[in-house]
Image (cartoon, helix red, strand yellow):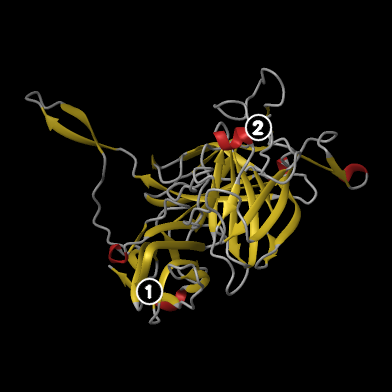
């Protein structure tokens, strides 16, 4: 188990101090926000215990072995709130070892603070492109906009009001153990030879038990998806909290977790996109659940065809030829490959935008999953883009960040979408999460799907 990060206010707990409009080479002054983060611990351990009987909660400062990167985020809780930011602290870094970090240049306003722990050596940005300012400036690193990951621990959102010239205290933030996955196969975005599909994964939790009866795997094909038969094999209990586990939960270093190694087979599957969904829950109080969905591609199987020739003695010789495709004379109306364009529709200057796209009403899916969704920012904006598609929720978060303001109206980004039938502009609903100018002041942007073009 690793030691907890001490962030400035407490000698025992993970504490973070946020300062707005301060900084420099010395003490950071001005607005402030402090909180202490404590991590869920195994029963009978930890420095903070509350509850009664079997529902006791145990929290402490030790960051569990299933956490290799700590992610701290701020998101505006309403209009005029501080711009969102994300900072990642990896195990083994100087900041982690010294247990000291200050986040700087946070504006006053209502903000939501969240803390997550990841088993990976990075933390995904999930659309939060802006790196939180720190003192020292190299403490922590930007969250990764190109890769997704499932957290092994996470807090609820904690609403805090930062007032000019004062230091607010959000108190203790509880970071709960979450069920997550290890060694998922096939990987998101991969291509698998059909017509059958084998799925394996470690379904694990660092503190609580994984509920065996809640583990389920499904595979859907077509657009919109229809589930195909999936035969879940016998689940093997795994335990990395003992020395030399008989069944490890993953192929990598022990993460001090328990759970099940699951596998199963789906099929037959047609060639084309398929979506794998794995759900699970733990027996914690409150119970925490996992619903992870991602896209893969099924290639057609190799097809064996025969050709016959006649030899001079009139006997027949048959040869076997293997090809990768077969030709048929059947014509079907397939899914439509579409490009969805998002635009800033009002005349305003903006440098940072985060918005959510609800596509529950759209007949299809965006191409790709999580941070690997097929999207790109408009290169004419000179902005960085981060895209995160939550397939299970049928919602995508898009973040754009530029050094200077770009002017609207303007196209912001395009994303690939596969629909059957083709979607229309009205199938997508956009909600602004935050919008700010280059000087970090909030601005009232209006974003919408402005065009859907299909083949």
Judged from the image, the secondary structure of the residue bearing numbered disc 2 is loop
Image: 48 above or below 313 = below
Mark 2, other Cα within 10 Å: few <14 / some 14–19 / many ≥20: some
Q: How many marks?
A: 2
In the foreground, 115 or 390: 115
Which of disc 2 and disc 1 is earlier in sequence? Answer: 2
**Numbered circle sitting on residue 242:** none
Q: Position of residue 373 (x, y in %)?
A: 41, 55
Judged from the image, the secondary structure of the residue bearing numbered disc 1 is strand
- Determine whether, in the image, residue 38 is placed left or right of residue 89: right
Cα distance between the residues tagged 1 and 2: 43 Å
Asked whether the viewer can see residue 145, the reply is yes
What's the residue at 33%, 66% (across, down)? 339
What's the residue at 83%, 36% (across, down)? 43
The residue labelled by disc 1 is: 343
Q: Position of residue 334 (x, y in %)?
A: 33, 62
In the foreground, 333 or 12: 12
Looking at the rendered image, the quarter that the C terminus falls into is: bottom left
Looking at the rendered image, the quarter that the N terminus falls into is: top right
Residue lying farthest to the right in this orientation: 53
In the foreground, 285 or 11: 11
- Determine whether, in the image, residue 151 is placed left or right of residue 347: right
Image: 163 above or below 277 = below
Q: Position of residue 435 (x, y in %)?
A: 49, 70
Q: Position of residue 191 (x, y in %)?
A: 38, 42
**Numbered circle sitting on residue 65:** 2
């Amino acid at each position: 188990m690793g030691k907890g990060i001490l962030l400035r206010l407490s000698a025992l707990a993970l504490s973070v101090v946020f300062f707005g409009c301060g900084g420099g080479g010395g003490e950071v002054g001005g607005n402030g926000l402090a909180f202490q983060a404590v991590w869920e611990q195994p029963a009978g351990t930890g420095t903070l215990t509350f509850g009664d009987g079997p529902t006791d909660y145990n929290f402490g400062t030790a960051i569990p072995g299933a956490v290799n990167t700590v992610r701290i985020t701020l998101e505006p809780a309403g209009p005029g709130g501080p711009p969102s930011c994300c900072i990642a602290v990896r195990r083994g870094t100087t900041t982690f070892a010294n247990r000291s970090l200050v986040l700087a240049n946070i504006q006053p306003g209502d903000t939501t603070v969240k803390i997550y722990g990841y088993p990976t050596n990075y933390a995904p940005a999930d659309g939060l492109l802006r790196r939180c300012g720190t003192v020292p400036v190299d403490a922590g690193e930007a969250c990764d906009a190109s890769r997704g990951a499932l957290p092994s621990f996470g807090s609820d959102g904690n609403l805090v009001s930062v007032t000019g010239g004062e230091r607010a205290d959000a108190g203790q933030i509880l970071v709960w153990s979450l069920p997550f996955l290890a060694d998922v196969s096939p990987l998101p975005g991969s291509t698998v030879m059909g017509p059958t599909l084998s799925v394996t994964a470690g379904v694990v939790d660092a503190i609580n038990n994984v509920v065996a009866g809640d583990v389920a795997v499904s595979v859907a094909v077509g657009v919109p998806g229809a589930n195909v038969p999936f035969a879940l094999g016998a689940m093997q209990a795994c335990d990395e909290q003992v020395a030399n586990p008989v069944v490890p939960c993953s192929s990598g270093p022990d993460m001090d977790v328990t759970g099940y190694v699951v596998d199963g087979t789906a099929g037959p599957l047609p060639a084309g996109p398929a979506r794998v969904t794995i759900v699970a829950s733990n027996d914690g109080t409150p119970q925490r659940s996992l619903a992870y969905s991602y896209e893969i591609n099924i290639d057609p199987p190799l097809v064996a065809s025969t050709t016959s020739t006649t030899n001079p003695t009139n006997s027949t010789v048959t040869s076997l030829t293997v090809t990768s495709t077969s030709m048929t004379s059947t014509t079907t109306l397939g899914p439509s490959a579409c490009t969805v364009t998002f635009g800033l529709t009002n005349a305003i200057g903006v440098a940072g935008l985060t918005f959510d796209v609800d596509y529950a009403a759209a007949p299809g899916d965006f191409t790709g999953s999580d941070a690997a969704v097929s999207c790109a920012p408009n290169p004419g904006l000179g902005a960085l883009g981060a895209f995160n598609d939550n397939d299970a929720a049928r919602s995508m978060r898009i973040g754009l960040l530029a050094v200077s303001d770009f002017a609207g109206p303007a196209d912001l980004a395009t994303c690939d979408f596969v629909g059957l039938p083709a979607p229309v502009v009205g199938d997508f609903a956009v909600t602004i999460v935050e919008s700010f100018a280059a000087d970090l002041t909030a601005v009232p942007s209006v974003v919408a799907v402005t065009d859907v073009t299909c083949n």
